Image (cartoon, helix red, strand yellow):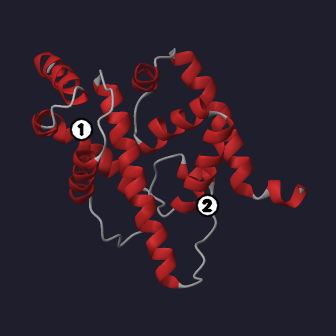
């Protein structure tokens, strides 16, 4: 595993330097981890979702191939980018489904259900995405912490490594962001305006 970790790091540096073939070599080395990340994403989707974890990994790969090169040096940064790409794919899918329903309202998101992986499925991913965008405008790092922890399934330590901050800062930002999102999604902001 350590050799593949070093190999992934070298390939990430090559990909960041513009060597597009390096991505093709990275994916097989981290495929299981990407599939597990996609599976965690799919836990939060409504039953009967047409996209499956394997398809989500493949779609993310296509987006990565088509994306502009970015500077990545660590596995954690790569997984953070993959989490962001997977989130965008699922949010775009959810938005298109809502548009198809023509006015069909989704049930309101309960943040406690959304932020804890459990048996209950189907948080309103679009509402959470909109709130997360607003949070990111107000505090970019807190938005990144939520994206990496909730959407990416990264541990506190992995999130700290990806963002180059301490685990304590991750925990503080995670707690503050969850409170902010809970307030934002509860609608209290609108009733007070």
Please tell me which residue is depicted at 16% across the width and 39% down the height of the picture. 27
**168 above or below 16?**
above
Q: Is residue 145 left or right of residue 154?
A: right
Residue nearer the viewer, 77 or 181: 77
Mark 2 surroundings within 10 Å by alpha-carbon count, few (fewer than 14), some (14 through 19), many (20 or more): some
- Where in the figure is residue 93, as x and y percent of width and height? 40, 66
Give how far across and how far down residue 99 sits, in percent.
50, 78
Q: Is residue 89 above or below residue 21?
A: below
The mark nearer the N terminus, 1 or 2, is 1
* Quadrant showing the N terminus: top left
> Which residue occupies the foreground of this view, 57 or 88?
88
Q: Position of residue 116 (x, y in %)?
A: 51, 46
**Residue behind mark 1:** 33
Count numbered badges in the picture.
Answer: 2
Q: What is the C-alpha distance between the residues marked 1 and 2? A: 28 Å
Helix, strand or loop status at disc 2: loop
Q: What number is the disc on residue 109?
A: 2
In the picture, measured across the screen, residue 186 lies left or right of residue 79, that is right
Q: Residues within 10 Å of mark 1 (few under 14, many from 20)?
A: few
In the rendered view of the protein, which quadrant contains the C terminus? bottom right
Which image quadrant is residue 157 in? Answer: top left
Q: Secondary structure at mark 1?
A: helix
- In the displayed structure image, the side of residue 145 where residue 31 appears, left or right: left
Name which residue lies at 22% across and 22% down: 13
Q: Residue furthest bottom?
A: 102
In the rendered image, the vertical position of residue 104 relative to residue 111, given as above or below: below
Q: Give yes or no for contact between labels 1 and 2 (Cβ–Cβ under 8 Å).
A: no
Q: Residue at x 51, y 75 (%)?
A: 98
Residue 185: x %, y % from top left: 69, 55
């Amino acid at each position: 595993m350590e050799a593949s970790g070093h190999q992934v790091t070298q390939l990430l540096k090559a990909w960041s330097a513009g060597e597009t073939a390096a991505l093709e070599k990275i994916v097989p080395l981290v495929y299981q981890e990407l599939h597990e990340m996609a599976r965690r994403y799919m836990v939060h989707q409504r039953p009967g979702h047409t996209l499956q974890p394997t398809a989500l990994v493949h779609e993310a790969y296509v987006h990565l191939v088509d994306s502009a090169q970015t500077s990545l040096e660590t596995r954690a940064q790569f997984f953070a980018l993959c989490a962001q790409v997977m989130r965008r794919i699922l949010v775009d899918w959810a938005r298109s489904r809502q548009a198809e329903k023509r006015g069909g309202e989704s049930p309101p998101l309960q943040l406690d259900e959304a932020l804890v992986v459990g048996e209950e499925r189907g948080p309103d991913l679009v509402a959470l995405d909109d709130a997360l965008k607003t949070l990111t405008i107000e505090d970019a790092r807190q938005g990144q912490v939520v994206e990496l922890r909730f959407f990416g399934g990264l541990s506190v330590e992995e999130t700290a490594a990806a963002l180059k901050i301490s685990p304590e800062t991750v925990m503080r930002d995670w707690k503050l962001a969850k409170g902010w999102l809970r307030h934002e999604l509860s609608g209290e902001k609108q009733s007070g305006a």
